[in-house]
Image: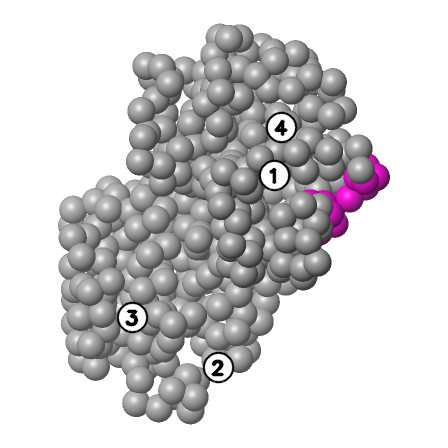
Amino acid sequence: MPRPTTILFDYGGTLDDDGRHWPVRWHAHFEEAGAAVPREAFLRAFSQADAALPRRHGLERAGLEETAALLGSDLAHALTPGRPELGARAAEAFVLSSRRFLRRNRALLESLKARFRLGVVSNFYGNLGAVLEAEGLSPLFDAVADSARVGASKPDGRIFRWALERLGTGPQQALMVGDSPPADLRGAEALGMPHAWLAGARPDRSPCCAGTPVLASLLELGPLLLGKPPAAAGIIAAGLGERLRGSHPGLPKPLVPVGGKPLVSWVARALFDAGVERLTVLFNSRGRAAREELRRAFPGRRIDFLEADTPSSFASFRLVARELAAREESFLMSTVDALVPPAEVLRFAAEAFAPGPGPRPRAAVALTRYVDDEKPLWAELGEDGTVRAFGDAVSRRETVTCGLYALTREAAAALPEAAPRLRDYWAGLAASGAAVRGVVLTDTIDVDRPEDIPAAERLISCFGA
């Protein structure tokens, strides 16, 4: 596939889900709400309600919640007379599901925005711009082609051309990403535009034409366009977790439950889902149950285990880094309490060693503007994306580290034999003039205290459905 300069996305089923069309999702939500409506009857009613929605209601400024509430109400009126609450429940579930995907995909879109022009081409009601604005996504798109406003619907080539003209490019330089072969892929194909099919979990995943990428998740677009992340990563899980002992007595930190699963499982899942192929995990001598948990959770995955009661966080870091550097040119590393969604991991991996205005980095650190730690490690970023200082040496307190790192073999080989704390290592590295790239992420949380767990459970919605 030729490298594009512009990416066009469908909205429904592409940005707000991994390939499930709206009628299918709405039918499932109505069934969950308690409405027993045969599939074919529901699809007919949905088609009618969907077509009539912009005529029946003033939608120009309606956001996602209002649009879903009106559609749910109209569907309930047609399918479950006298039971409007079923439509309200289905609409609420639809919005929650959509927002999980929109939030998850935001990090991917932000990474793509740094390298490509982005647009949306959608058969919608005339208020897609309002929906994107209400969900905080408008700044990511340079053109929004809403069929009700453009006056043409996919697969009509006019709606694609409308977006391309505003993006200042032609169809051969763009990539259309969508979940509907008839509307998205055939429409793009007729213009000679490369396209990718978000097929999701459909059993029939045969591409529409030779060379068309078939995606199970929108996140797979990241490695396709930004490059694959390092093949290997390490997880440091040898600490004692002192601040969680009161709420979880006798339970090692890696096994502290978040959303019904051990914390270490979420960290491993994020790395695997981002494209990492092999993990090296360090536990202390109390971590054997956590080791078995990972084996159960990820059968068939390549996971190597180290066991050591290390004297410091830096000693753990050095041990894992050198193990990885023995076979890898570059790799990722995460602490066990760093909860970072897969899209954010992918974004970090794509930007860690990407060419930039500054010197080639030997290492990279993920940063966040969300500060909720008793002793954060502040990091000061220069205009070229290089970290100028850590800790007490910073002049502006705007970002802090969040426990996700990338190292080259060269950086691992240069790790000193001893450093009091991991934060002292990073401070010394920046002070020495070594190039350390800083990548600011949007969604992360450091799970150090009992009060961090509710926020962590909200964040795991970004890990996908």
Residue 450 is labelled as 2
Residue extending farthest to the right is: 58
Amino acid, disc 3: Ala
Q: Taking 15 as reference, is 135 left or right?
A: right
Look at the numbered disc 3 and give the secondary structure of its residue. strand
Q: Does the magenta stretch include residue 68?
A: yes
Residue 122 is labelled as 4
Residues under labels 4 and 1: Cα distance?
18 Å
Which of disc 4 and disc 3 is earlier in sequence?
A: 4
Which of disc 1 and disc 4 is earlier in sequence?
A: 1
From the top left corner, tell me how far across and down residue 96 is, in percent. 58, 56
From the top left corner, tell me how far across and down residue 179 is, in percent. 47, 31
Residues under labels 1 and 2: Cα distance?
45 Å
Residue 237 is labelled as 3
From the top left corner, tell me how far across and down residue 297 is, in percent. 24, 62
Look at the numbered disc 1 and give the secondary structure of its residue. helix
Q: Are marks 3 and 4 in contact (CB under 8 Å)?
A: no
- Give the quadrant of residue 359: top left
Q: Please name whichever residue, 365 or 46, is drawn nearer the observer in this view of the structure.
A: 46
Q: How many marks?
A: 4
Region in magenta: 57-71
- Give the quadrant of residue 243: bottom left
